[in-house]
Amino acid sequence: MAESQWLVSGKMEFTEEQINRYSRHILLPEVGGKGQKKIAKSRILLVGAGGLGSPAALYLAAAGVGTIGLIDSDVVDLTNLQRQVLHHTPDVGRPKVLSGKEKIQALNPDVSVSMYEERLTAGNALKIFGDYDVVIDGVDNFPAKFLINDACFFAGKPLVHGGILRFEGRVTTIIPKKSACYRCVFKAPPPPGLVASCQEAGVIGVLAGIIGTIQATEALKLVLGIGRPLTDRLLDFDARKTQFREIKVRRNQNCALCGEHPTITELFDDGDPYAGCAMRPSA
Amino acid sequence: MQVKINGKPEEVQNGTVLDLLKTKNIEPQMVAVEVNDKVLDRDHLATTHLNEGDHVEFLFYMGGGR
């Protein structure tokens, strides 16, 4: 893995240009030079370089995160461009990880980008997650969301979960064994027979920016060790009303993953990743 | 009786959480239900009776991201 370009002769010192670039961070008492160095040493993994991953990647790159990992097996499709702002019109047909890496490094050459042009599976998740400090969920299907939740639990990595559909979005932060996990609330993926595809349900593009940037904010707070993380709370956003709502959740002692008598003791692929996403009944 | 559903006060019939889901035409498998900040096991939807003033949350799966 490429060494971050921060490390000059083994010791991290900012150049004058870097001090200028990050001056608005360094001015913040909660960040300062010390915090900016934490950001520069941090390694953040984006699972999915799409709607949520795009804004997260751009802001984390701008913030000077040392290493950003991108996992995505897809190529850019024309229908992605309505919301996946990491990719531009000439990128259609190109691998998302490559398109993403180019944009990140054009924005900030200080950032190292690790590309994983593959699907996340029970076979590769722990090995990849082990190299990172924080994982951001930007995938579009439930089996993958459950897999990410489980892998973060087994790898002991904080997870910033996100989801968007139609005009609504949700964010929550999960610190394994300390706060409620995805399975504490949603036990398992919804049955495939009851789900409709994301493509059918649609999503207002800007929602990806709102939710993805909150995810990036949470990741930076975790790296800096500041503030109060969005743990044990689901933050739901409704774009039609421009309204946020916080729903308290707690660790579930019956959780199959992190409860008192877990039945999930190793990673597995939970269902068909092509099963699509759930739709709220139109009642 | 009055309960709060997803933050909003609503008048509902006496009954179980499952009755409420049926009234609202919500498929139980599509939602996680929290009553007073505690997630219910699906097996308990039919046996959990609602009480005046309960806070009920229907948490729908939100799966998109791409």
Image (cartoon, coloured by chain):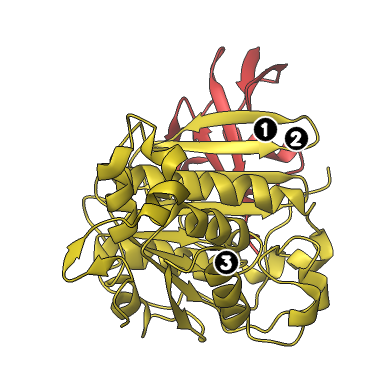
Chain colours: A yellow, B red
In this picture, residue A199 sits left or right of residue A104: right
Within the image, what quadrant is residue A224 found in? top left
Which quarter of the rendering shows the C terminus of chain A?
Answer: top right
Does residue A156 appear left or right of residue A161 in this picture? Answer: left
Would you place residue A101 above or below residue A45 in this image?
below
Q: Which residue is mark 3?
A: A139
Q: Nearer the viewer, residue A185 or A154?
A: A154
Amino acid bearing label 2? Thr
The answer, for residue A59, to whether it is visible in the render is yes
Q: CA distance from mark 2 to mark 3?
A: 33 Å
Chain bearing mark 2: B
> Residue A100 location in percent, x, y?
59, 73
Residue topped by disc 1: B20
- Give the secondary structure at mark 3: loop
Residue at x-position 77% and y-position 79%: A77
Determine whether A40 is above or below A10 in the image.
above
| Badge 3: residue crowd in 10 Å (few <14, some 14–19, many ≥20) | many
Marks counted in the figure total 3
